[in-house]
Amino acid sequence: MNKKEIISIESISKIYHLGDNVVKALDNVSLKIYENDFISIMGPSGSGKSTLMNIIGCLDVPSKGTYKLDNIEIDKMTDSDLAKIRNQKIGFVFQTFNLLPKLNAVQNVEVPLIYSSLSKSERIAKAKNALNSVGLGDRFDHKPNELSGGQRQRVAIARALVNSPSIILADEPTGNLDSKSGLEILKFFDELHKAGNTIIVVTHEDSVANRAKRKVEIFDGKISKDE
Amino acid sequence: MERFLKMNNIFQNIAIGLRAIKSNPTRVFLTSLGLTIGIFTVSIITAGVSSIDKEFEKSMAYYGNDKLYVSTWPWSFNFDWWKYRNRPRIEEDNLQYITQYSQYIDDVSLRKTSWIRGSYGNTASWLQINGVYPSYQDMLSGTKIENGRFFSQNEWDLQRRVIIVGATVRDGFFDGQDPIGKTIRLGGVSFEVIGELKKQGMGMVPGGTLDNLVIMPSTTFKRILTRWGFDELVLKTRPEQMAIAKEEAEMIMRVARKLKPDEENNFAVNSADAYKQQFDSLKIAIAGVGFLVTGISLIVSAIGIMNVMFVSVKERTKEIGLRKAMGATSRNILVQFLSEAVTISIIGGLAGIILVKLLTLALASFLPVSFDLLLIFYTFLVCVFIGITAGMIPARNAASLNPIDALRHE
């Protein structure tokens, strides 16, 4: 089976200069991710997994090497081009949900759409659709503080999905949830995967990583395991 | 279409900025208060100066643009009493010299002025009395005979007790009835009203109103009213030769007074434009101080807005990070925070305008302040300018935040 290549990372490095010290957060890493992959990235703190995630998420650019997302070269893009890529190609799910507290569920899901030039009615329709698809059709007007942790994370997932991105990038998505809600979210990722989405989960929990079909471990800025 | 979408995008970011304001009304109120006060003062000063101006124009009409007044003292706001106190009174005789030697004066009249208590029936009031020549009829400025007639040469010669009354006298004594033929008592003597002057309104002249006036023959005045007062010579020329006529009048008066070349004038030739010069400098002083105070308050309020915007950016660092992760460009964030600053500023300005409007409504009866749409428009411009100036640095800080760091911010 020949799957479409979504992410192609070719020997990238990320080097930070802290005073006289040179820190190699990523050291010559190469990674390919295909369409409908469900991949986990594991590693202890300081291993470089956050840096890798930031680069995959187009929040940062590598010091060396090339990164292609959907065949678009990312590594030499300007800030506003990166913003557009983030808007169209990537759906972020954060550990702390990062919902805006003053906005209700629909308005929160609308946020990415605001930056993609849609009319208000289109935005609302799309946001409601996305909320329906995560099973929150009855929570449109609820503010984050009126929702449970699991529900909040589902609003965040709806927000990640709303622009039909190429990849869903989740950073410790269950880290702030109790085990029951966490399991609920993980089941949800399974469903998304079955529906054809490409999912990358960054985690340090084995139970989360085990759900993924492919496990990548990173240590000292290098990929130590990929199976 | 592309362009439309871009505009749409800007409106979205403005909407986000507005929502931030709605969620913190107290802070916005306090921040915009400085601007409210600034806009309020600048509007009041502008309106005040323009109202004073209008009143002044009216008073100028009273003095006329073709008349010279030979008086003991110059018309001045800063009157140096000690310098002028020993000057001789103006004598009626001087008029002969002027009519005899002048080329530029077309007509002359003596004008004696005094104040006296007048009564009609049970009503009594202080009135300004002018005793003049019959020729004064053509030298009335800013008003004219509206009803009845002026006194004749014959009545002047015979020292008849006939008077022409101003509008205030008519309203006060006769309650709107036709005053012609009625008899008013001035200092115990009866006078017949033969004419009535057109209303002039309030003016910036000594006494406040221009209508509390009674005119009679100067001969009658001299015979009956022995009260303290002062005399002036009213000279009529043409507007285009005011300057030369003034010089000429001065020369003739010096000759009439037998002043030596090294002696100073012991009289003054006054005219409306000399008054106006003094008034203009006063106006500039009022406006200058006002605008300085306002300018300072606007700068202070701009600093206040800037401060609040820094706080707002700091508080919402995480939101900025999130929005950037979701695809907001730096420009989007810049517009969002700029529109927040501009809105705070406009709210302050509008509140100021509303205050001005309320004040002018309350004071409408005795402070006629002009209030127009142009003022709203200028206020709007000033507010947008202040908002952008004050918001620029905080908004740029927000726009330049690195999304990774911003997201991690707690």
Image (cartoon, rainbow, N blue to C red):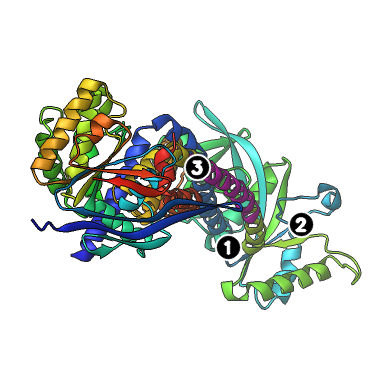
Q: Amino acid at mark 3?
A: Phe
Quadrant in the picture for residue B297 = top right
Q: Of discs 2 and 3, which sits in the foreground?
A: 3
In the rendered image, the quadrant that contains the N terminus of chain A is bottom left
For image coordinates 76% across by 54% down, the residue present is B73
Q: Residues within 10 Å of mark 2 (few under 14, many from 20)?
A: many
User: Tag 1 or tag 2, which sits nearer the N-term?
Assistant: 2
Residue B51 can be seen, yes or no: yes
Pointer 2 or 3: first along the chain: 2
Name the residue tied to disc 3: B310
Q: Which residue is mark 2?
A: B90
Q: Is residue B262 above or below residue A154?
A: below
Image position, residue A145 (x, y; %) = 28, 24
- Report the Cα–Cα distance between label 2 and label 1: 19 Å
Q: Position of residue B94 (x, y in %)?
A: 76, 64
Provide the secondary structure element on which disc 1 rests.
helix
From the image, tell me which residue sits under label 1.
B135
